Image (cartoon, rainbow, N blue to C red):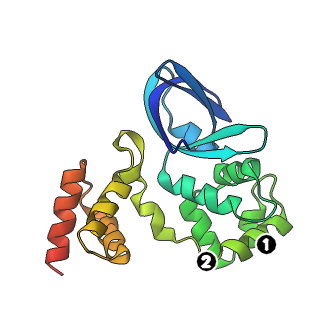
Amino acid sequence: MIAYLEGELFQKRPDYLIIKVGGVGYQTFIPLSTFYQLPEPPASVALHIHTQVQTDSLQLYAFATLDEKQTFIKLLSIPRVGPRLALNILSGISPQDLAQTLIQGDIPRLAAIPGLGRKSAERIMVELKGKLRPDATAVSALSSGPQGALWEDALSALINLGYSRTLAEEVLRHVQLHEKPLTLEEILRLSLSRLASQ
């Protein structure tokens, strides 16, 4: 299962891109939000990947942030929401705005996304309400771009040290928002310092 790709951006289009890794070109489908964040090829890129395995095909979906990938997976869990519609939703609304829209019960905002409609918006509202948090996207910069899965690595390290997931996530969000560290070592040092002062 491919979960992450780092390589050369070989081709870029609004709906898909090709990443060259070790002489192999991987075609990955993307939302517009990821397209806008990508440099022009050729360039080095690092993207979060969701692998969709079907009976007769294997398709890859790429995202600039871990939040986008996780939101995409949650959208796929909704009946009658396939990969194309999920990408369309992410092209029309950010994960943070989607979470806020769900909290506010703003069906017209969802229904305004091209290809969605009111009935689909109502179904998404029911299925995802309470499952997305607006503050979840506060860690996007930590887990995107060339730094890779720093958020996951830092979270795993803190949990292995005996801290609860909830407490570790709270501290990491605070560190990301206020300190903006660049390395895993800095993230852990600042997180442990904050935990020690609590």
Disc 1 is placed on an element classified as helix
Residue at (56%, 44%) from the top-left corner? Answer: 1
- Residue 85 position (above or below residue 118): above
Q: Is residue 9 left or right of residue 98?
A: left
Residue that mark 2 sits on: 103
Residue 159 falls in which quadrant of the image? bottom left
In front of the other: 55 or 120: 55
Tell me whether the residue at label 1 lies in contact with that at label 2, contact meaning CB atoms closer than 8 angstroms.
no
- Residue 187 position (above or below residue 123): above
Residue that mark 1 sits on: 122
**Which residue is the extreme one toward the front?**
55
Q: Earlier in the sequence, mark 1 or mark 2?
A: 2
Q: Is residue 186 left or right of residue 168?
A: left
Residue at (18%, 63%) from the top-left corner? Answer: 190
Q: Is residue 137 left or right of residue 86?
A: left
Residue at (16%, 60%) from the top-left corner? Answer: 189
Disc 2 is placed on an element classified as helix
Q: Is residue 182 visible?
A: yes
Q: Position of residue 74 (x, y in %)?
A: 63, 63
Image quarter where the C terminus lies is bottom left
Q: Position of residue 115 (x, y in %)?
A: 82, 52
- Residue 154 position (above or below residue 118): above
Q: Position of residue 124 (x, y in %)?
A: 73, 69
Amino acid type of the residue that numbered disc 1 sits on in the rendered structure:
Glu
Pointer 2 local density, CA inside 10 Å: few below 14, some 14–19, many at least 20: some
In front of the other: 7 or 16: 7
Amino acid type of the residue that numbered disc 2 sits on in the rendered structure:
Ile
